[in-house]
Image (cartoon, rainbow, N blue to C red):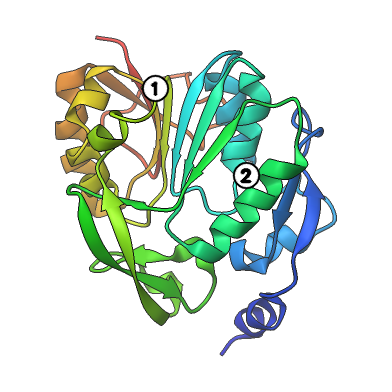
C-alpha cells in the first residue's frame, strides 16, 4: 500500500464542509477523502478546474442539468449555483454513503437551483446491477465489468437499482446539460438514452479511451461536435473523436 493510499483510507470517515472556489464561492460542499485527498485541502481551487470551467461555459440561469455519477456533488452544486432558482439539477448517484453527503450539501445551500438526489445507477436497462465500492476511494466506484486499475479493487459489492436515461425522462424535465462520469460505463448510459440525446443537450462526459470510437458513432447521428474539455479554451477547435473529458455540442 502506498503512502497516498494509506492516507486516503485513514481519513475516509472525516467529513468536512468546504466552500467552492469563485465564481461558485457561495456554495458549501460536504466532502471527504472518499472523493480524493485533494478534497481535504482548506481551499478547493485545485480540485477540478476544467470541470468547474465547463459549468461556467454551459450552464445558464434556468438550465435543467442532469449529473450522472454525481459523487460528492462538485458539479451538481456548482451547476445549481449557475442555474439559479429557476433551474433544476438532478444528481444521480448509486452509492448510499455519497448520497448522504449530497443530501447534506443540498440542505446547506439556499438560493440555488433545486437539487434532486436520486440513488440509482444509470445503465442501458432498467433493473438491478452489481456495483463495486472501490477500495481506494469512492470517486472510482464502478458497475460490474467496468472500472479501471486505479480503483485498487473493490472493498465490497452492493446491489443497486439501474435505470436508463430515457426512463429518467419519464419523471424529470429533459436536460439542457447532461454530465456523465461513471468510470467506463458511459456507453451503457448513452445507449439507453436515444430520446434524451434526440433532445440534443450539451454533453459533458468522461470517455474511456477504448470507448471513444463507439461514443463518436453513437453521438454523431444526433449532430454532436466534440471538443476537449481539458483545453484552456475548450471551444477553440473541434476534435475528431471524443477525448477523455468530452464537451459535446449538437451543432449539425
Q: Which mark is residue 66?
A: none
Q: Quadrant of the C terminus?
A: top left
**Crowdedness of circle 2 by 10 Å Cα count: few (<14), some, many (20+)?**
many
Whether residue 153 is visible, yes or no, is no
Q: Secondary structure at mark 2?
A: helix
Q: Name the residue: 37% across, 57% down.
A: 183
Q: Secondary structure at mark 1?
A: loop
Look at mark 1 in the image and give the residue it sits on: 173
**In x, y percent, where is residue 14?**
75, 72
239 relative to 159, above or below? above
Q: Name the residue: 35% across, 40% down.
A: 243
**In x, y percent, where is residue 110?**
76, 31
Whether residue 222 is visible, yes or no, is yes
Q: Is residue 220 left or right of residue 205?
A: left
Depth check, front residue: 190 or 57: 190
Q: Name the residue: 30% across, 11% down.
A: 251
**In x, y percent, where is residue 224?**
27, 21
Depth check, front residue: 155 or 38: 155
Q: Is residue 232 left or right of residue 156?
A: right
Query: What residue occupies the far bottom of the structure in this picture?
Result: 1
Q: Nearer the viewer, mark 2 or mark 1?
A: 1
Look at mark 2 in the image and give the residue it sits on: 74
| Quarter-of-image position of residue 45 | top right
Query: What residue occupies the far front of the structure in this picture?
Result: 171
Q: Name the residue: 51% across, 44% down.
A: 117
Q: Quadrant of the N terminus?
A: bottom right
**In x, y percent, where is residue 192?**
19, 39
Amino acid at each position: 500500500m502506498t503512502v497516498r493510499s494509506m492516507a486516503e483510507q485513514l481519513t475516509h470517515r472525516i467529513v468536512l464542509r468546504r466552500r467552492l472556489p469563485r465564481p461558485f464561492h457561495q456554495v458549501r460542499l460536504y466532502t471527504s477523502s472518499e472523493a480524493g485527498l485533494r478534497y481535504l485541502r482548506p481551499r478547493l481551487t485545485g480540485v477540478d478546474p476544467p470541470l468547474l470551467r465547463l459549468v461556467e461555459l454551459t450552464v445558464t440561469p434556468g438550465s435543467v442539468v442532469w449529473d450522472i455519477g454525481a459523487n460528492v456533488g462538485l458539479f451538481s452544486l456548482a451547476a445549481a449555483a449557475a442555474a439559479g432558482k429557476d433551474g433544476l439539477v438532478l444528481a444521480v448517484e448509486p452509492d448510499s454513503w455519497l448520497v448522504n453527503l449530497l443530501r447534506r450539501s443540498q440542505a446547506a445551500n439556499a438560493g440555488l437551483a433545486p437539487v434532486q438526489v436520486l440513488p440509482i445507477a444509470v445503465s442501458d436497462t432498467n433493473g438491478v446491477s452489481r456495483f463495486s465500492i472501490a477500495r481506494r476511494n469512492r470517486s472510482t466506484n464502478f458497475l460490474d465489468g467496468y472500472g479501471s486499475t486505479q480503483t485498487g479493487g473493490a472493498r465490497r459489492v452492493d446491489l443497486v437499482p439501474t435505470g436508463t436515461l430515457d426512463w429518467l425522462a419519464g419523471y424529470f424535465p429533459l436536460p439542457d446539460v447532461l454530465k456523465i462520469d461513471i468510470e467506463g460505463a458511459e456507453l451503457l448510459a448513452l445507449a439507453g438514452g436515444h430520446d434524451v440525446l434526440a433532445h440534443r443537450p450539451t454533453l459533458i462526459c468522461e470517455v474511456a479511451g477504448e470507448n471513444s470510437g463507439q461514443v463518436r458513432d453513437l453521438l454523431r447521428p444526433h449532430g454532436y461536435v466534440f471538443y476537449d474539455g481539458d483545453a484552456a479554451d475548450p471551444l477553440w477547435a473541434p476534435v475528431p473523436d471524443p477525448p477523455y473529458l468530452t464537451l459535446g455540442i449538437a451543432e449539425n
